[in-house]
Image (spheres, coloured by chain):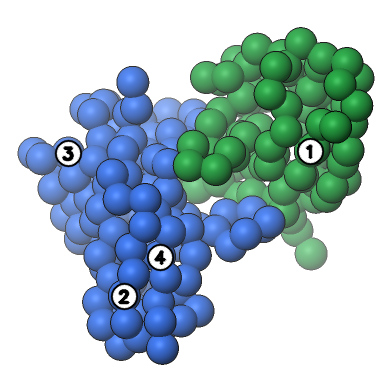
Chain colours: A green, B blue
């Protein structure tokens, strides 16, 4: 089945450690996105990529890094520079020739201890 | 500044009645609007969308209305069912290829039986 797979679903990290969240899609979509959800804050854009080897910062990119070496993959690294990393992270993808609809993964819950 | 605003954090409705969720936007370049539904610890799922060339779009129990002059849209759910209880996000885009969606903060709908 086509879709977006995020892993791990739950992750715990000590302060000062970097952690990488995986996102893989087999929908043949060109564009991929990372959003962060916090209670009462909605979905805020971290980074997005429209094509391989290119990506743009979103509204809250500080303390995060991404790479887009393959069309199917868009991993997100939460660095120790991110002041409030505990959140629910959502990866999404879309077709650049489509209507703009985003397809989301199931999310990854990161907790910093 | 929030470009997409959902001013009601929560809404409670009885089963069988109408649910009306509201959304306002400030960016006049937005020309495509979407509603997503989200359950806890899951990714959002697409519900319904509307292009700026229309003022209404209907899909079963769900209807979205767009008032461009007021920069306002609303989602009507009739009749409401307990399974509709979820967080509803309004999103907008200027529909450039691969452009990220801008989301509101969401409205939590509770439908009681």
Chain ID at mark 2: B
Q: Is residue A71 in sight in this rendering? A: no
Q: Which residue is mark 3?
A: B71
Label 1: which secondary element: strand
A78 to B25, vertically: above or below = above
Residue B25 drawn at (x, y percent): 26, 35
Query: Which residue is label 4 attached to?
Result: B109
Disc 4/disc 3 C-alpha distance (Å):
22 Å
Q: CA distance from mark 2 to mark 1?
A: 33 Å
Q: Residues within 10 Å of mark 4 (few under 14, many from 20)?
A: many
User: Compared with residue A58, is residue A29 higher up or lower down, i.e. above or below?
Assistant: below
Q: Quadrant of the N terminus of chain A?
A: bottom right
Q: Are marks 2 and 4 in contact (CB under 8 Å)?
A: yes
- Numbered mark located on residue A110 in the image: 1
Foreground tag (3 vs 2): 2
Q: Nearer the viewer, mark 4 or mark 3?
A: 4
| Position of the C terminus of chain A by quadrant | top right
Cα–Cα gap, marks 3 and 2: 25 Å
> For residue B102, what is the image quadrant?
top left
Q: Same chain, marks 4 and 3?
A: yes
Residue at the spot x=62%, y=35% of the render? A36
Check if mark 3's residue and mark 1's residue have beta carbons within 8 Å: no
Residue B13 shows which numbered tag?
Answer: 2
Residue sitting nearer the eye, A95 or B107: B107
Q: Residue A55, image x and y in percent?
A: 66, 17
Number of marks in the image?
4
Work out whether residue B93 or residue A12 is closer to the camera in this orientation and state it: A12
């Amino acid at each position: 089945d086509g879709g977006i797979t995020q892993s791990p679903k739950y992750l715990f990290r000590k302060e000062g450690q970097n952690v990488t969240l995986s996102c893989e899609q087999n929908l043949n979509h060109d564009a991929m996105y990372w959003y962060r959800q916090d209670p009462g804050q909605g979905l805020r854009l971290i980074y997005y990529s429209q094509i391989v080897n290119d990506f743009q910062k979103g509204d809250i990119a500080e303390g995060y890094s991404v790479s887009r070496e393959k069309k199917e993959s868009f991993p997100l690294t939460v660095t120790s520079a991110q002041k409030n990393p505990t959140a629910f992270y959502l990866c999404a993808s879309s077709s650049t020739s489509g209507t703009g609809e985003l397809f989301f993964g199931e999310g990854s819950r990161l907790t910093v201890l | 500044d929030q470009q997409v605003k959902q001013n009601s954090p929560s809404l409670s409705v009885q089963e069988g009645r109408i649910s009306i969720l509201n959304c306002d936007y400030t960016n006049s370049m937005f020309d495509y609007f979407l509603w997503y539904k989200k359950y806890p610890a899951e990714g959002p799922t697409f519900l319904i969308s509307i292009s700026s060339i229309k003022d209404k779009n209907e899909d079963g129990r769900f209807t979205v209305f767009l008032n461009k002059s007021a920069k306002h849209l609303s989602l009507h759910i009739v009749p409401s069912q307990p399974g509709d209880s979820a967080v509803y996000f309004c999103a907008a885009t200027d529909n450039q290829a691969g452009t990220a969606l801008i989301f509101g903060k969401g409205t939590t709908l509770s439908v009681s039986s």
